[in-house]
Amino acid sequence: MRMRLAILISICVVIVALSVVSFLTYENWRTHRYDHLIMEAAVDHQLPPGLLKAIMDARGHFNYYTMGEKGEVGLLQVPQEGVAEYKKAKLSPDYEFGYVCINKAHPPHTGIKQNIRGPCNICKSRLIPEMWYPRQNVEVGAWYLAKLKADIEGADGSGKRNLEDAIPLMVAAYCLTDKNVRAATDNFRNPVLPPGLRNSIRDILEKYERYRQRL
């Protein structure tokens, strides 16, 4: 009887241990699988990689299918005004993002765009909107953050505002709309966010403090 009980306890311990290891392995993969995209975008747009990852964690939850209540899309929850600014600067105001296949089993056409929704013309896999495609989404989101950074740094006419002082304004403008934050900070001239706006982005700022030490 005691032998059976000992065996049963041992089996339970092994199952629990395997479950914990599996969970930790999955969490490590989930939270780090886009680090290469974060680093590339951070270098290209001269942004702290920890900031991009903090937004991806707090807003996109590392899920590229995420869509916000106000139309924010993808890993970086790119706001619609950010998409519009990107299209205006990089493409054209009436440019329409298409749909892409992300089937990793077919590298020759991974990322190729189609203009209409539906299955992939080659492998029949389901397409996703291009703005949800991880690489495109991170690129557009990082570009828009860099634009906000430039606007904020130039607001006092010197262009030398400390980056760490500018980050709360950047995050607030990105998440709570450029228009609202400009109105609350005298067109970015006041570097101090009102308490209500700062509280709304507290989660991102706290995650940024954590990630900036790791990336």
Image (cartoon, rainbow, N blue to C red):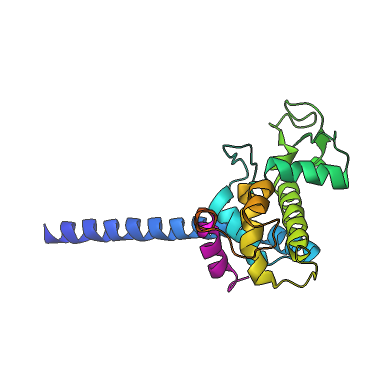
Q: Per the image, is 200 magenta?
A: no
Q: Position of residue 103 (x, y in %)?
A: 71, 40
The segment highlighted magenta reads 201-215
Q: Position of residue 69 (x, y in %)?
A: 57, 37
Please tell me whether residue 104 is drawn above or below residue 12 in the rendered image.
above
Which is more toward the observer, 157 or 169? 157
Q: Position of residue 133 (x, y in %)?
A: 71, 43
User: Which residue is located at x 80 percent, y 28 percent?
Assistant: 121
Please tell me whether residue 114 is drawn above or below residue 169 in the rendered image.
above
Secondary structure mostly taken by the magenta-highlighted segment of the chain: helix
Quarter location, residue 194: bottom right
* 102 left or right of 27 in image: right
User: Which residue is located at x 39 percent, y 55 percent?
Assistant: 19
Quarter location, residue 67: top right
Which residue is the extreme one toward the left?
1
Which is more toward the observer, 39 or 150? 150
User: Is any part of residue 90 visible from this angle?
Assistant: yes
Which is more toward the observer, 26 or 162? 162
Which is more toward the observer, 157 or 19? 157
User: Is any part of residue 102 visible from this angle?
Assistant: no
Quarter of the image for the N terminus: give it. Answer: bottom left
Q: Position of residue 7 (x, y in %)?
A: 23, 59
Q: Per the image, is 210 magenta?
A: yes
